[in-house]
Image (cartoon, coloured by chain):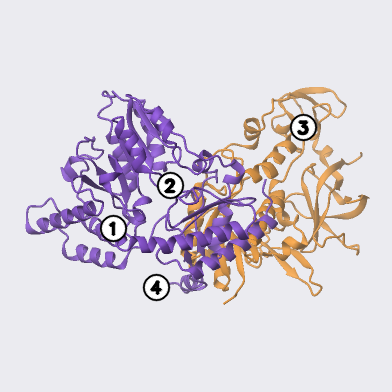
Chain colours: A orange, B purple
Amino acid sequence: MNEKHVVVAMSGGVDSSVAAAIMVQQGYRVTGIMLKLWTADCSPQENACCTPESINQAREVAGILGIPFYVIDARDDFKSAVVDRYIDMNYQGKTPNPCYWCNQTIRWGYLLDKTLALGADFLVTGHYANITKDKNNEYHLYKGVDPKKDQSYVLSGLNQWQLAHTSLPLGSLTKDVVREKAQELKLPVASKPDSQDLCFIGNNNYRIFLEQNSGRATNSGNIVDKSGNIIGFHAGLQNYTIGQRKGLGAGNKDPVYVVSKIIETNEIVVGSKNDLLFTRVKIGPMNWISGVKPQKEMEYEVKIRYKAKPQPGKLSVAEPNYYYYQFLSPVRDATTGQIVVIYYKNEVIGSGEIVLAELEGE
Amino acid sequence: MICPLYKHAIITAGMKMDRIYLDYAATTPVDLEVIRMMINNFENDFGNPSSIHSFGQNAETTLSKARKSILELMNAKETDLIFTSGGTESDNLALRGCIKSAEDLSKKKLLISPVEHPAIAITCASLEKLYGIQTIQLRVDKDGIIEPRFLKETIDADTLLVSIIWANNEIGTINDISYLGKLCKDQGVLIHTDAVQATAHLQVNWETLNIDLMSFGAHKFYGPKGVGGLLKNKNITLTPQSTGGSQEENLRAGTQNVPLILGMAKAYELVNEGREVRNLRLIHLRDMIINGVLQSIPGTFLTGHPEKRLPNHASFVIEGVSGQDLVIGLDMAGFAVSSGSACKVGKPTPSQVLLAIGIPEDLARGALRVTIGRNTTEDQAISFLSALKKLVKELRHKVNYK
């Protein structure tokens, strides 16, 4: 019998349920906690965490595993730390990644603080990533074994202390194995589909979400080409993303794409596909997993989005805690607000937000 | 076949530690003697009391014996006792039953205290909607005691019913219900009391209680869940809320749950034996907990009256922590307690009862209720105090509260 007491962050989904089961199997004293998070509409909705349906499923799983389970209301903290920031950034012309801060401030902030205060030793989640400790007692974060499910991207904002109080039992497994395990254990969530969208958006798309929840009036403006000629009108910068092709109005002979958004003039600049090549991004403030930037120059790769292909390139200092990353070959769709995660092979080195994306020829 | 994992999990959850139950105001374990009587009844005397044959007659006898036993112990021999499914149903029957029909609303006012159980408060809100009944909130002092003067001044010819909780479930305060009853009687107004908490600890003397209707439930006094009663003076006519057969003097249709009613009568008999001595022990333990919390943890305050409170009831508000975290943290440490409300999922909004006695909203979020019972020992109280002290320190240190 292991004397360690762990809290598993349960969502009612298959991953966290199996994570809890594994901890029970390994002999830990296990407690399940679900955070009730703010969502745009309270109607039960599949694939979004923390709806009443998910609460019941998590409770059912906890009952099968014989572990205590509690729901903690974190709606206010989640709303201010994650949702409000998401809304603000959209109106600043950025493309935010709320899951990244949710992990930093809610799961490994609010919940980890509670976990430890309530007397448990560490926090367990169903993320597909791996944490190791080296002989100098330093913690390292690695990609999950399943390349299709690797979630190291969204955990790249964590620090040494957070990693030291975390266990990720699914990091060495593939999703298929996890589903099989759930079936073996007859967990009722074994075939539940994976969640896809942002959990707080509700049933609508993000544009309608912003319209209904931002409390801001629509600020329409001009769509201009690279030379500044007005070629159409837009219904608010927040409704467009870099690289977007649809919804820019008819009448263009060649397809046009959103190339940049200019907050100051409330303009959307469009161009051809070839105008969308970004050569360099400035990122920061940085979170280095080790706490400091690694001394050795290494061959880094970065991911500019969760599902993006890793891009080789070179890192150089821009200003304290901000870096440039020069892509070896230009990339499309690099947008301010996105999180750039720096990898060395399978290890996460650090991450930072894109504050500037430079187009080729600028 | 039991999956090896489940077996292991049950062992993990069950054997790790001794769990200590300190939530007797929520419910109590059923007395073994009561269980034995009930099992025998389920097995051997299963007749329907409405049946003509001997099985039915036996059940009818059991039922009337149970009724008589409770009424005698409450010194209410000449009173009606309607068996219900528990305190909530009794409250509903009393309040809803006072309305003759939607057309006959000659009296429109319900006077209730602001510290009532939801079975009263929410039912009144429902009657407001359904019939346009007007609910008037009485006044309470900082300990949750109903102000008699305000009650006296507020009662008028339009008052349909006054309903006041005898002993409060959240803060333990005991009202002088017989005095309040007299005030109502003097003005010819009906009074109901929710005695769900009180019946477990206080002697009911119906003759001197000055009450017209009284609700109680068995599971607060070591009886089974799902059974209770409503005491009703014979001169009062209620409108049945469930119709069908003529059971319970036409006031509550449906076959009586004889085994549970029998269990309730037995449990009530047992709880009346040696009550005073038992209460002295509970009061000693309760005060040990109250003093221990107030003296060893800074920023803690007792809620409810310091003396006029249930012998088993200690309730607090604690600065800089949330009641929800306290309940979860204590459960993880092996102690079952409760906070302001029993909501497992909802938003931990501060309790209306605590706000009504003037506790600021922020402080009211840190509510803790510790209620002890037969099986509580001094050692348990001591280890509870040290667990609470440690938890409050950790929560204040590691979690930032707004």
Please rate how many residues cluster around mark 1, counting C-alpha atoms within 10 Å: few if below 14, some from 14 to 19, many from 20: many
The reply to whether label 2 and label 4 mark residues of one chain is yes
Q: Residue at x 76, y 64 (%)?
A: A346
Tell which tag, 1 or 4, sits nearer the viewer.
Answer: 1
Instruction: Report, in whole angstroms, how far the alpha carbon at label 3 lies from the one at label 1.
Output: 82 Å
Q: Amino acid at mark 2?
A: Asn
| Residue nearest the viewer, comparing A195 with A56 | A56
Q: Residue at x 77, y 66 (%)?
A: A140
Give the image location of residue B399, x and y in percent.
67, 54
What SS does tag 1 mark?
helix
What SS does tag 2 mark?
loop
The reply to whether label 3 and label 1 mark residues of one chain is no
Which label belongs to residue B1?
4
**Residue identified by numbered label 3:** A256
| Residue nearest the viewer, comparing B165 with B204 | B204
Please rate how many residues cluster around mark 2, counting C-alpha atoms within 10 Å: few if below 14, some from 14 to 19, many from 20: many
**Residue identified by numbered label 1:** B268
Q: Considering only vertical position in the picture, is A228 above or below B147? A: above
What SS does tag 3 mark?
loop
Q: Residue at x 47, y 74 (%)?
A: B4
Tell which tag, 2 or 3, sits nearer the viewer.
Answer: 2
Q: Considering only vertical position in the picture, is B218 above or below B105? A: below
The reply to whether label 1 and label 4 mark residues of one chain is yes
Please rate how many residues cluster around mark 4, counting C-alpha atoms within 10 Å: few if below 14, some from 14 to 19, many from 20: few
**Residue identified by numbered label 2:** B168
Give the image location of residue B132, x and y in percent.
36, 25
